[in-house]
Image (cartoon, helix red, strand yellow):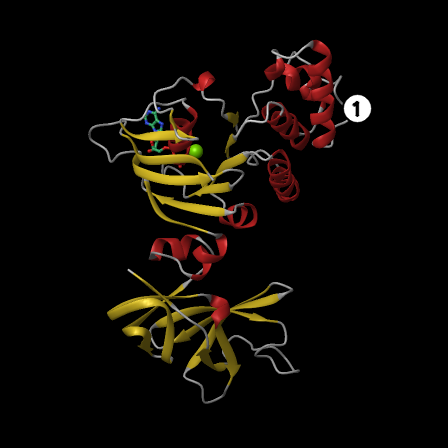
Amino acid sequence: DVLLEVEGLSRHFHATEAPAVDRVSLSLGEGELMALLGPSGCGKTTTLRMIGGLEMPDAGSVRLRGRDITRLPVEKRGIGIVFQDYALFPHLSVRDNVKFGLRKLTRAAADARAEEMLALVGLEGLGGRKPHQLSGGQQQRVALARTLAVSPPLVLLDEPFSNLDAAMRVETRQEVRRLLKRIGSAGILVTHDQEEALALADRIAVMEKGRVLQIGTPDEIYRNPATRFVAAFIGRSNIVPGRANGMDVETAFGRLPLSRAANGRVSLAVRPEQIMIEADPTGPAAVVGREFRGHDQLYWVQEGERCLLVISGLGQGQGMGAPIAIGDRVRLRICDCVTPVD
Ligand code: ADP
Ligand code: MG
């Protein structure tokens, strides 16, 4: 069932500049988790604030369960918001922070709900502490417990892991996904981190310069990026020219299948792991750079005027002997669908 429908949402701060948010449309199902992904300044926060009611749009509409909430004040929307800095009350205990949204309940019911939420986020027994006595990851979970305590149909999270170190971030993001799914709340998570979006979201909306370029599952976006920007921003891509004819394309690597139809001159996005590398003393290309990453190797390979990035699994392209070294001649093969972009 559709929970949220955003249509043509726009916000223009300065008449002389491009709009911060430019006709953004998206919809979200009940319980679905969407990442709003894009580089800094592309309009993610402004979009989220307009959905939450912290910012009024110049145009467009927001509907929640069919009801138009575009002009409704934030407190009347029933949407949960988790801020980047957690916004916990420093003078209140962890328990009282969580109880903050539960003022309509009796004291006993609010206490019980707060304990239940603290247990759910793995903080049982810490209700009496003050926020500053907790780690960053724990404070994040208190903020989440406070927001989820009222079971909002939708939770908005703006870069919620940016204050955590790398290891905590990976752990906490799976925790957040699990909690949202458990409570049954849908979520929109703003992030500039493609890895986070791929790992966390049911669907990703990729933004650039105020616009949504593509919405899809992580798999769809990775395998079939809509534009060159999406191909470069999510994962890494080589751009190779070709001449398309329906569902296949002529390239310097021979005739290849396309992930979607195109015709005429095209630029193709080719993922580094779609390229096979083979040592060959008579090969047309040469390795100019190499990076060992444990589970695989990166190679930068010069072929004519092009430099291609290749990722090769261990054992692959290496025989059983020494790996391919810088300066070695190689042959590259592509044996997968490639995607026409722009
Ligand atoms: P993101 O969250 O993707 O980094 P923002 O939504 O914060 O992007 O900002 C998008 C653009 O809008 C930026 O150019 C930013 O400077 C501008 N902007 C955001 N909020 C305001 C504001 N309150 N007043 C003026 N300009 C703003
Ligand atoms: Mg932002």
Q: Position of residue 116 (x, y in %)?
A: 72, 25
Q: Please identify the residue farthest to the left as the structure is shown.
A: 16
**Of the pair 326 and 128, the residue shown nearer to us:** 128
SS for dot 1: loop
Q: Is residue 5 left or right of residue 243?
A: right
Q: Is residue 3 left or right of residue 8?
A: right
- For image coordinates 56% across by 49% down, the residue present is 199
**Of the pair 80 and 138, the residue shown nearer to us:** 80
Q: Is residue 60 visible?
A: yes
User: Which quadrant holds residue 325?
Assistant: bottom right
**Of the pair 85 and 61, the residue shown nearer to us:** 61
Image quarter for ligand 1: top left
The residue under label 1 is 125
- For image coordinates 45% across by 79% down, the residue present is 333
Type of amino acid at the residue the image marks with label 1: Gly
Q: Quadrant of the C terminus?
A: bottom left
- For image coordinates 60% across by 40% down, the residue present is 177
Q: Position of residue 272 (x, y in %)?
A: 47, 67
Would you place residue 211 above or below residue 286 in this image? Answer: above
Crowd around label 1: few <14 · some 14–19 · many ≥20 (10 Å): few
